[in-house]
Amino acid sequence: HAGVSFESIEGLRNVLTKRRLELISVIRHKKPHSIYELSKLLNRDLKSVNTDLKVLKENDFVSLKKTSNGRQRVIPVVEFDKIEVIVKV
């Protein structure tokens, strides 16, 4: 089991916004073949999807696989099916 940690609940909230959680879910369940396809599935601007993917990648919630079937594409991948939050007190 891999883990990601944050120094505060606010840090977690800043990374896992409602829109980013939706993005993770769509990647996991719809398995888009490109970032462009992902933006269409979400009905969101490509630039904002790229920004969210960058944040999620930096925090190890998504990976981006490069492929070149004809033309080069970047495929977003989510390799887990749940997120558990553990808070130390």
Image (cartoon, grey):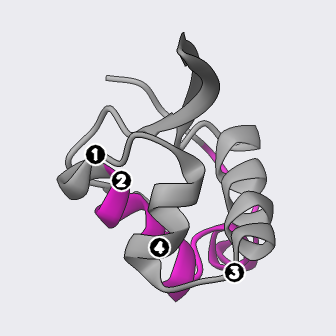
Q: Regarding mark 1 in the picture, which secondary structure is present there?
A: loop
Label 3 element class: loop
Q: Mark 2 touching mark 1, by CB under 8 A?
A: yes
Q: Which residue is mark 4?
A: 40
Type of the residue with mark 3: Asp
Taking the magenta stretch, the answer to whether it contains residue 23 is yes
Mark drawn on residue 69: none
The image position of residue 3, as x and y in percent, is 48, 33
User: Where are the magenta residues, as a range?
Assistant: 5-27
- Whether pointer 4 and pointer 2 mark residues with C-beta atoms closer than 8 Å, the reply is no
Q: Residue furthest front?
A: 70
Marks 1/3: CA–CA distance? 18 Å
Q: Secondary structure of the magenta portion, mostly?
A: helix
Q: Residue 71: percent from the left, percent from the top?
A: 62, 22
Secondary structure state at the residue bearing disc 4: helix
Which disc is residue 31 wearing?
A: 1
Q: In the depicted view, which residue is nearer to us: 21 or 65?
A: 65
Distance from Cα at disc 4 to Cα at disc 3? 8 Å
Q: Is residue 19 left or right of residue 85?
A: right
Sort mark 1 into few (<14), some (14-19) or many (20+) by Cα contacts within 10 Å: some
| Distance Cα–Cα, label 2 vs label 1 | 5 Å
**Residue 10 screen position, x and y as percent:** 73, 79
Q: From the image, tell me which residue sits under label 2.
A: 27
Q: Looking at the picture, how far across and down is residue 20, in whole percent?
A: 55, 72
Is residue 60 on the magenta stretch? Answer: no
Q: Can you identify the residue that label 3 sits on?
A: 45
Mark 4 or mark 1, whichever is nearer to me:
4
Quadrant of the snapshot with the N terminus: top left
Q: Residues within 10 Å of mark 2 (few under 14, many from 20)?
A: many
